[in-house]
Image: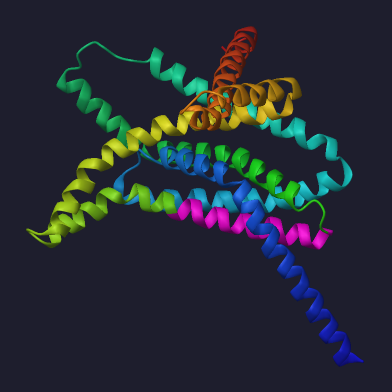
Amino acid sequence: MAGASLLTLLDDIATILDDVAAMSKVAARKTAGVLGDDLALNAQQVSGVASERELPVVWAVAKGSFRNKLILVPLALLISAFIPWAITPLLMFGGLFLCYEGFEKVYHSMTHKTSAPIDDETIVAKAKADIDDLAAFEKDKIKGAIRTDFVLSAEIIAISLGVAAHMDLMGQFLTLSVIALIMTVGVYGLVAGIVKIDDLGLYLARRKAQGLGHKIGLMLVSAAPYLMKILTVVGTIAMFMVGGGILTHGIHVVFEWIEHAAVVVEQINVVGGVLGLLTPSVLNALFGVVAGGLAVLLMNAVMKLIPSKG
């Protein structure tokens, strides 16, 4: 009887794992878009730190991402079991926060441009201050990246939970755990590779004076700064796309209007198929920009009402 019970248990575990593997594949396909946005956001979030600190920063953010998912997976299961109606409002709040951060970043870059020439003494003084503030700068980078990761991870977990909704509690838990692990390792492994592209290029360029490796190294070194600038722009756009997408999915009327607009543009000859794919993303991003702008205005108004200390 003991042997039979053990075989039955092993058979049940094997069945669960088969279901988890199947559901994980489906969930991975459904979260692929968020994964791309997650990658762009996190790569640009950890850019700007000293070269020798890039990997430690990525690792610190990755550990924060694991902690996020250790919180989110059981929390998602509890919410789904007891208050499923709360999932959408919570996701929408997170989406609005992403839009707010994205708009604030754009607004800050537009309103803090310095056109006046800076003398050498000012540059030296600023460099010394920057060196003193490196630790604080690094901590801010890590906190910001982990905060952004929390919202994106919440969306990934919610999508995965929707895919595994028909499974029992154990199956849901294993599916979410598999997705959380794969997404975290995959995203931050790629982020680490992206931020070290310039170092790889320098290594290849120095290793051989001539040849293909030398040329590839020089190309990577030259391309790295432009790649990081592109990722900064893409990451900000991704904030609006992801945040706006979460908000529009929660507002049924807006979601239906966007779906209808996509169907309409698909009827255009030749380019209809491409436009049909791009339209939801573009409209979600525009909605995110508007929502982020309104959130920034509201926050600024609230801050003005709060009396300053001293």
Of the pair 8 and 121, the residue shown nearer to us: 8
Percent across and percent down for residue 156 are: 64, 45
In magenta, the rendered stretch is 168-189
- In this rendering, position of residue 278 left or right of residue 156: left
The stretch drawn in magenta includes residue 190: no
Expressed as whole percent of the image width and height from the top left, the position of residue 225 reads: 27, 38
Give the residue at x 21% y 24%: 123
Left or right: residue 65 compared with residue 163:
left
Residue at horizontal 61 percent and vertical 41 percent from the top: 150
Q: Is residue 3 left or right of residue 262?
A: right
Dominant secondary structure, magenta: helix
Taking the spot 74% from the left edge, 33% from the top edge, the residue there is 90
In this view, 297 is above or below 256: above
Percent position of residue 214, x then y: 13, 56
Q: How many marks?
A: 0
Q: Residue at x 30, y 50 (%)?
A: 197
In the image, residue 249 sits, relative to residue 53, either above or below, namely above
- The answer to whether residue 1 is left or right of residue 272 is right
